[in-house]
Structures are given as C-alpha cells and as structure tokens.
Amino acid sequence: MTIPNLLSVIRLALIPLIVWLYIGKQEYSAAVAVILISGATDIIDGFIARKFNMVSDLGKILDPVADKLTQATVILCLTVKYRWMRGLIVLFVVKEIIMAVLGYMAIQKKDVVNSAKWYGKLNTVVLYLVMTCLILFPSISETVANVLIGICICVMLMSLTLYIRFYLNLFRTN
C-alpha cells in the first residue's frame, strides 16, 4: 500500500460523510469542505505518485474509482434538488461503463493500463466546480443551475468522444 493508494482509500471513506452532511444534516458548507478535502487528496496523491515514482497499476485503477464514486455520489445527492442532474447521472453512468469496457479491452489486448488524459481531468474539474456551486448556493435560480448542468453535460460528452477516439487509435496500433 503506497501513500497515493492510501489517499485514494481515504477518498473512498469520505463518500458516506459527504452524503450524511448533504442529505442527512443539510450542512452544505461542511459537505463542500469534505468534497474539497477529497479533491485535494486526489491532487496530492497524483503529485506524490509521479514525484516519488509511486505510480502503480493498482493506483491507476483505485484513483479513478475513488474519483468516479465520489462524483456519482455527489451527482446523486444533487438529483434530489435539480431535475437536470438525472440526465447528467445517466450520461455519467453510460460514460463510465464505456470507459470501463474500453479500459478492460486495453488491458486484455494491449496489456496496458492507461492514465487519465487532459480531457478527463477537465471533465472532473468542471464537474466539481459546478457541483460545488450548486451545493454552496442552494437558492440559485433553476435557469442558472440548468445552464451549469448543461455545461457539465457538454464537457462530459466531449471527454467521452475524445476517450473513444483515443482507445480506437490504441486498438488500431500494433
């Protein structure tokens, strides 16, 4: 168990706390604080992994799993208040299933575990920014909320398209 992998496990452990703070206690600022702590540990684990040569295949899997479960949890929490989040969660699940299948195929056919690309990171940043805004400003207008969610949907579609293109190119090479 490397330090980056331990940080990913901590992020997984923070997920129930986020749900409890957002839904159970309606402590929105505290929920955002935990989300920010989770995001900070994500950045720190990546930095440590690269800087101290602690990159591992387990980490390449554990890190995005922690990210995706955190993101899915927050999106699900927000579906209680924002109708358009339902469309985002459907797209999110479809994207992650496609990504898992393509990642599995890459392991099977090319014996390689791929790291996140810039467009995946952009998708994560936009998603976290929007989710943070929607949590911190619960009285935001429905129109503004829908625009923010629409931006997430567009960035997520772009990310999915670019990942599909990446994997198709990978499978074409010998």
Image (spheres, grey):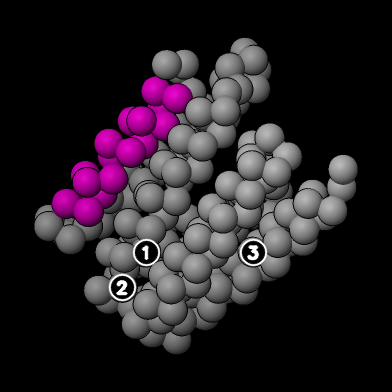
Residue at the spot of label 2: 79
Q: Is residue 55 left or right of residue 4?
A: right
Pick the quarter of the image with the C terminus. Answer: top right
Q: Is residue 51 above or below residue 70?
A: above
Residue 90 visible in this rendered orientation of the protein = yes
Q: Return the disc, 1 or 3, that comes first in the chain's sequence.
A: 1
Distance (Cα) linking label 2 and label 3: 22 Å
Residue 65: x %, y % from top left: 44, 43
Please report contact status of discs 1 and 2: CB closer than 8 Å, yes or no. Answer: yes
Q: Amino acid at mark 1?
A: Ile
Q: Is residue 2 above or below residue 63?
A: above
Label 3: how many residues lie within 10 Å, few (<14), some (14-19) or many (20+)?
many
Q: Would you place residue 19 above or below residue 141 in this image?
A: above
- Residue drawn at x 37%, y 64% as measured from the top left: 75
| Magenta segment | 5-21
Q: Nearer the viewer, residue 153 or 26?
A: 153
Closer to the chain start, of discs 2 and 3, is 2
Quarter of the figure with residue 116:
top right
In front: label 2 or label 3? 3
State which quarter of the image contains the N terminus: top left
The image position of residue 56, as x and y in percent, is 57, 23
Residue on which disc 1 sits: 75
SS majority, magenta: helix
Helix, strand or loop status at disc 1: helix
Where is mark 3, residue-wise? Answer: 160
Residues 174 and 6: in front is 174
